């Protein structure tokens, strides 16, 4: 576990920018808050390995939640903000475009 600003990020974190054992590329600097436990993890696999419960996804209506944490600057973004952007609005750090392929692991589709 590491601390990014006031937030504790759990899981197989490998550096101070929230890269993890599963995703450690140059752009993999985001952690996500899981609605099931209220804990930050770098990725779904980290949650699966460490949490004692199945992950829950964010319902579509909760797009205003500050659930993304940028390891580059330590600031949070809302789900809606994150999904509409390709880089952190605070520090300009690019998000890994490949993460979009896994959004269904984190965000439930709108009903
Ligand atoms: Zn959880
Ligand atoms: Zn991970
Ligand atoms: Zn940032």
Image (tube, grey):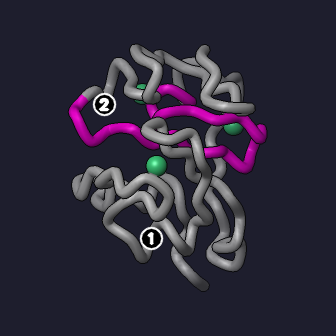
Q: Position of residue 28 (x, y in %)?
A: 32, 38
* Nearer the observer, 18 or 51: 18
Please name the residue shown 61% across and 52% down the image.
76
Residue 14 falls in image quadrant? top left
Question: Residue 29 in the image: x percent, y percent?
Answer: 39, 38
Is residue 20 rendered to the left or right of residue 79? left
Q: Is residue 94 or residue 68 the one in the foreground?
A: 94
Mark identifier at residue 83: 1
Residue 37 image label:
none
The structure residue drawn at horizontal position 46% and vertical position 28%, both measured from the top left corner, is 18
Identify the magenta region: 25-47
As drawn, the residue found furthest toward the front would be: 91
- In the image, is the residue at mark 2 within 8 Å of ligand 2 by its beta carbon? yes
Quarter of the image for the C terminus: give it.
bottom right
Q: Is residue 44 visible?
A: no
Inspect this view and state whether residue 49 appears: yes
Q: Is residue 31 left or right of residue 20?
A: right
Kindly identify which residue carries mark 2: 23
| Whole-percent x, y for residue 80 in the image | 55, 74
Taking depth in this image into account, of 36 and 66 the one nearest to the observer is 66
| Contact? badges 2 and 1 (CB < 8 Å) | no
Q: Secondary structure at mark 2?
A: loop
Q: Marks 2/1: CA distance?
A: 19 Å
Residue 15, placed above or below residue 39 = above
What secondary structure is marked by label 1? helix
């Amino acid at each position: 576990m590491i601390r990014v600003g006031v937030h504790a990020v759990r899981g197989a974190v490998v550096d101070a920018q929230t890269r993890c054992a599963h995703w450690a590329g140059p752009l993999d600097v985001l952690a996500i808050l899981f609605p099931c436990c209220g804990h930050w993890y770098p990725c779904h696999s980290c949650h699966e390995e460490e949490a004692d419960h199945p992950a829950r996804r964010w319902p579509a209506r909760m797009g205003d939640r500050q659930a993304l944490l940028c390891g580059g600057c330590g600031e949070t973004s809302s789900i809606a903000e994150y999904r509409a952007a390709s880089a952190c609005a605070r520090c300009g750090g690019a998000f890994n475009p490949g993460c979009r392929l896994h959004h269904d692991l984190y965000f439930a589709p709108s009903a």
